[in-house]
Amino acid sequence: MSALTRRAWLAGLGLVTASAAGALGYRAWRDRAPAAPPARNEAGALVWRNWSGVAHAYPQTRAAPASEGELAALLRTAHAPIRAVGAGHSFTALAATQGTLLSLDRLTGLVSHDAANHEAVVRAGARLGDLGPALSAIGQEMANLPDINRQTLAGAMATGTHGTGQGLRALHGEALSLRIVTPRGDIIDCDEVRNAGLYQCARVGLGAFGIVTQARLRNKALTRIRKRVALVALEEAYEQWPALVAAHRNAEMYVIPFTGLAATIVADETDDPVRPRGPDQDSAFLMALKGLRDWLGWSASARRAAAQALLANTPAEEAVDEGWRLLSNDRPHRFNEMEYHLPADAQIAALREVMGAIETHRSDVFFPIEVRRIAPDEAWLSPFYQRESGSIAVHAYYKDDHQFFFDLIEPIFRRHDGRPHWGKLHSLRAPDLAGLYPRWREAMDVRRELDPDGRLLNDYLRGLLIDA
């Protein structure tokens, strides 16, 4: 789809929704940002907030060591709880602390690379958005990338962040070795042979097994991909999904509530010349969906009819470029999110239930539901541990109530044996999680050995890993 075509239908959609204003603007009075916490607490500490704004804290100390030696010294003496923070893109309180907030922003960049085997050693504070061009310069690319690339490498791996594609593992699945600084200040190298238990824990470690300072990544030779985005009827998308996953290197789907439509996105390697994707239009599309919600949310049929009239015949859009330019996106509009990873063969059945619950009970939802596929791996706390997984992510605009995640959506995910994304909203605690991970007890033994005093645990993590 050309930028001109997109602008035309987005403008048309804006006109339709604006024409319904007046008597139908039932949402307008609620469209305001949540109140921000005070900039400082009574002790004068500055506030820290996560990206969506739902978690905040007032760290007593903030630190950004420039070397592993500085980090080791800091961990021995810093005020607990000590929590590492990357981009703050987790929706949970993983990084919140009244003790020491630790940034790895000064531990970034490439350390070394192996051209023959397409491997690179990367410092843990590197942002994924910076790694793309850095790896491209040495003829490599990461095998898979998440939807958003603002995260640090360490933060993304620690929470099981992933992209999509049959046979493609989450980011931590391509970490061949790690270097970790423990709460005692010891520096440990680990892989499948050396300190193997720590390696299998710390690849998805929630920052609870020590601070990862660098990782050796298994990459692939740099290639170009062709990315194709198409709007299709929802039932057609449900039926096509298994075939899309099997036929393409990357496949994902965005199901759009109250429209009867879904966007299917596929990518494959190609030798075709570069055709950049052009200016981002996803933000305008999202706000157009919000406009439909705001002015036609009183009638599901009117909302669906307007969307169908303006969007159903939208032509497909294609772009060709290096993968790091096409697989991740800019998401300027804040939201909150719940994502669970289900057995692959349960994905579409659960998705149908999720859509039914939203369209029956929550006319305020307008964000598309993201659907992806992830290969299994062996990390003990990986949501994909020994299981081909289909993920479903439900979003809510940051100004909107997201309690329905827990009331309506999470019970569906749990009935289908889902494991929650560690960085996204869920209500599970240690007893629930222990039943989902076969190596849970072994992982907890490793954690206690490394951090017997719990210096790396904030209240949220204690609930996840210890408390009944």
Image (cartoon, rainbow, N blue to C red):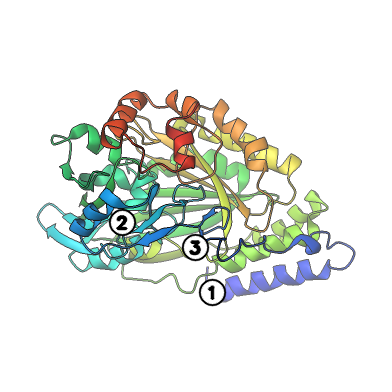
Given the image, on which type of amino acid does mark 3 rest? Answer: Ala
Q: Which residue is drawn at 30% across and 37% down?
A: 451
The residue positioned 24% from the left and 64% from the top of the image is 66
Q: Are marks 3 and 1 in contact (CB under 8 Å)?
A: no
Q: How far apart are marks 3 and 1 (CA)?
A: 46 Å
Q: Name the residue under label 2.
A: 269
Residue 219 visible in image: no
Q: Is mark 1 on a helix, strand or loop?
A: helix
Nearest to viewer (mark 3 / mark 2): 3
Give the alpha-carbon distance from disc 1 to disc 2, as whole Å.
Answer: 24 Å
In this view, which residue lies farthest toward the bottom? 4
Asked if 109 appears above or below 243 in the picture, the reply is below
431 vs 274, nearest the viewer: 431
Is 280 on the left-hand or right-hand side of 220?
right
Which residue is more in the foreground, 124 or 217? 124
User: Is label 3 in a helix, a strand or a loop?
Assistant: loop
Q: Is mark 2 on a helix, strand or loop?
A: strand
Q: What label sits on residue 172 in the rendered view?
A: none
Q: Which residue is drawn at 48% across and 25% down?
A: 431
Task: Give the total of numbered labels.
Answer: 3
Residue identified by numbered label 1: 3
Q: Is residue 116 above or below residue 130?
A: above
**Within-10-Å neighbours for mark 2: few <14, some 14–19, many 20+:** some
Q: What residue type is labelled 2?
A: Glu
For label 3, the residue is 45
Q: Point out residue 89 in the picture as x, y percentages from the top left corner.
A: 46, 56
